[in-house]
């Protein structure tokens, strides 16, 4: 066996070794490809899930904005009613603390003793009106009679601004 035969066997052995190495690398690349495809599929599923959750969060956020606007509107309505009631409370307070012709504050107790029937009727009517004011302030709907009242004799004197919307005081 000569030197050329040794080189020939070495080359054949090298080719065989390179073949085994290429075969092994090919299988390693196949495994990596399968793993990469699985990771890609998982990433796509995660992306779809994230997109769905983002849409759900947008829906929730839009609903919260609508709810906030409704609450804000309701608060504005309550504030308006409260301001009217404060004015009417002041007017009612002024009725009880009126100064009479002689310059003295009116004494409801003395009036009740002197004119029992009259004061009783006035107090009972005012109490019924005040109770109705509370009902309206708590959300009770207005009756047709209350809605259409335009004369002073027809109105609820305790809270005309919320009980009688068509009444204009002059």
Image: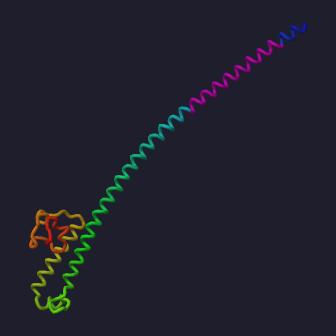
Q: Is residue 37 left or right of residue 121?
A: right
Of residues 61 and 25, the one nearer the viewer is: 61
- Asked which quadrant contains residue 156, the reply is bottom left
- Asked which quadrant contains residue 147, the reply is bottom left
- Asked which quadrant contains residue 21, the reply is top right
Q: Is residue 36 left or right of residue 82?
A: right
The answer to if 23 sits in the magenta stretch is yes
Q: Looking at the image, which residue sits at the far front? A: 170
Picture layout, residue 37 above or below residue 118? above
Of residues 29 and 77, the one nearer the viewer is: 77
Q: Main secondary structure of the magenta part?
A: helix
- Numbered range of the magenta stretch: 10-39
At 30% from the left and 60% from the top, the residue drawn is: 74
Which quadrant does the C terminus fall into? Answer: bottom left
The answer to if 4 sits in the magenta stretch is no
Of residues 2 and 57, the one nearer the viewer is: 57
Picture layout, residue 27 above or below residue 116? above
Q: Looking at the image, which residue sits at the far right? A: 2
At 60% from the left and 27% from the top, the residue drawn is: 34
Query: What colouring style does the render use?
Result: rainbow
Q: Position of residue 93 (x, y in %)?
A: 23, 81
């Amino acid at each position: 066996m000569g030197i050329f035969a040794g080189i020939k066997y070495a080359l054949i052995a090298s080719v065989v070794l390179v073949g085994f190495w290429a075969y092994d690398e090919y299988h390693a690349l196949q495994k990596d490809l399968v793993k990469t495809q699985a990771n890609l599929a998982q990433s796509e599923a995660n992306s779809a899930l994230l997109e769905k959750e983002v849409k759900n969060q947008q829906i929730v956020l839009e609903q919260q904005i609508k709810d906030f606007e409704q609450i804000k509107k309701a608060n504005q309505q309550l504030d308006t009613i409260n301001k009217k009631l404060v004015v009417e409370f002041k007017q009612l307070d002024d009725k009880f603390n009126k100064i009479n012709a002689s310059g003295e504050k009116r004494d409801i107790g003395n009036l009740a003793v002197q004119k029992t029937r009259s004061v009783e009727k006035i107090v009972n009517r005012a109490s019924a009106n005040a109770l109705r004011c509370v009902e309206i302030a708590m959300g009770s709907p207005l009756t047709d009679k209350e809605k259409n009242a335009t004369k002073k004799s027809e109105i609820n004197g305790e809270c005309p601004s919320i009980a009688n919307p068509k009444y204009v005081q002059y």
